[in-house]
């Protein structure tokens, strides 16, 4: 079942109108959320990112859009789909109401929430290889819009097609200054000795929720020096490790870029700390 504006509908009747602004103009944003056994992971960070993103897009936030209201909407949907004992992926999408052309008739919003089951009940690291390359056909503008999860993901889509056609497992996106910003579906972290770097939000990377969690963890590990700093493509081949992060998969090591083969020691350690933190908070 799917939640559309607070109503639970069967999948086969949960449709949107042809003039839906999210479909017609990409006038929408979304949050991808992981729920483990009815517990929403990192809910506060998701909620505040959603609110900030809606403000950036000049959407009118309804008075009832409180964290408690949306949390109940999510848990009720998970329960109704009989997935309360499972780990699931939630997609919460918000779009402006229909009306207008490029300029909307109203800034009021509608929303929908969908759910799908995940295989693992906690974060794991795959031992499979992950070879990446740079995507150079299109670049991301380093501005505020690139930091939110809007429906405008054409660069990621074309990067995914390029990845598939050329036999890679993922590819790395760059901004218009030719600096590394993220992978197709996650933030990027680079490890060199005791230095861990990740691109700053000001370079145009998504303000990822798991990126935020990992930075909080690293602040408490004195053996590492952590930098939110620009990363050039040349630094990738000098790194000891590269890994990607998102809230659905957790930490995903990159094993190869061009002729460089990476280790996974730090990413495995950080994933263990992350899983421990999640268990303690539940």
Image (cartoon, grey):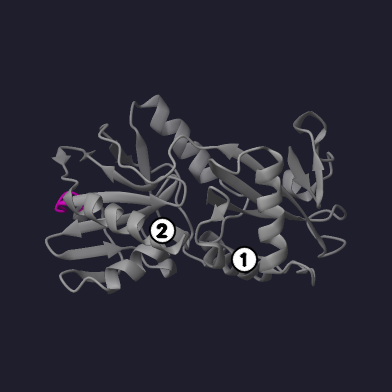
Quadrant holding the N terminus: top right
Q: Residue furthest left?
A: 193
Earlier sequence position, callout 1 versus callout 2: 1
Q: Is residue 217 magenta?
A: no
Which residue position holds label 1?
Answer: 53
Q: How dense is the environment of label 1, judged by Cα within 10 Å: few (below 14), some, or many (20 and up)?
A: many
Q: Quadrant of residue 223?
A: bottom left
Residue 24, horizontal then vertical, whole percent: 76, 45
Instruction: Examine the residues drawn in magenta and state their main secondary structure.
Output: loop
Q: Secondary structure at mark 1?
A: helix
Q: Quadrant of residue 48?
A: bottom right
Residue 208, horizontal then vertical, whole percent: 46, 59
Q: Residue at (11%, 61%) from the top-left corner?
A: 193
What range of the chain is rendered magenta? 236-240
Q: Residue at (42%, 32%) from the top-left corner?
A: 162
Residue 108 seen in this snapshot: yes
Taking 218 as reference, is 110 left or right?
A: right
Judge whether 136 appears above or below 281 on screen: above
Which residue position holds label 2?
Answer: 278
Residue 124, horizontal then vertical, whole percent: 34, 42
Taking 28 as reference, is 172 left or right?
A: left
Q: CA distance from mark 1 to mark 2?
A: 25 Å
Q: Quadrant of residue 277?
A: bottom left
């Amino acid at each position: 079942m799917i939640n559309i504006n607070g109503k639970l509908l069967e999948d086969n009747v949960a449709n949107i109108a042809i003039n839906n602004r999210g479909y017609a103009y990409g006038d929408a944003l979304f949050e991808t959320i992981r729920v483990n056994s009815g517990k929403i992971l990192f809910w506060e960070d998701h909620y505040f990112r959603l609110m900030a993103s809606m403000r950036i897009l000049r959407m009118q936030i309804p008075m009832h859009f409180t964290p408690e209201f949306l949390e109940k909407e999510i848990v009720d949907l998970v329960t109704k789909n009989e997935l309360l004992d499972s780990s699931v992926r939630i997609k919460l999408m918000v779009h402006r109401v229909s009306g207008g052309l490029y300029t909307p008739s109203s800034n009021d919003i509608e929303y929908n929430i969908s759910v799908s089951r995940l295989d693992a009940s906690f974060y794991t690291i795959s031992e499979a290889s992950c070879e990446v390359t740079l995507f150079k056909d299109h670049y991301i503008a380093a501005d505020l819009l690139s930091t939110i999860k809007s429906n405008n993901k054409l660069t990621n889509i074309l990067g995914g097609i390029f990845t598939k056609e050329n036999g890679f497992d993922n590819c790395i996106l760059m901004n218009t200054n030719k600096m590394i910003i993220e992978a197709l579906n996650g933030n990027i972290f680079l490890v060199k000795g005791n230095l861990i770097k990740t691109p700053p939000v000001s370079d145009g990377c998504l303000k990822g929720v798991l990126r935020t969690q990992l930075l909080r963890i690293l602040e408490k590990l004195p053996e590492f020096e952590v930098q939110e700093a620009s990363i050039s493509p040349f630094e990738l081949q000098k790194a000891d490790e590269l890994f990607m992060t998102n809230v659905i998969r957790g930490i995903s090591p990159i094993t190869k870029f061009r002729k460089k083969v990476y280790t996974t020691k730090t990413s495995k350690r950080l994933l263990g700390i992350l899983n421990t933190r999640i268990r303690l908070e539940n």
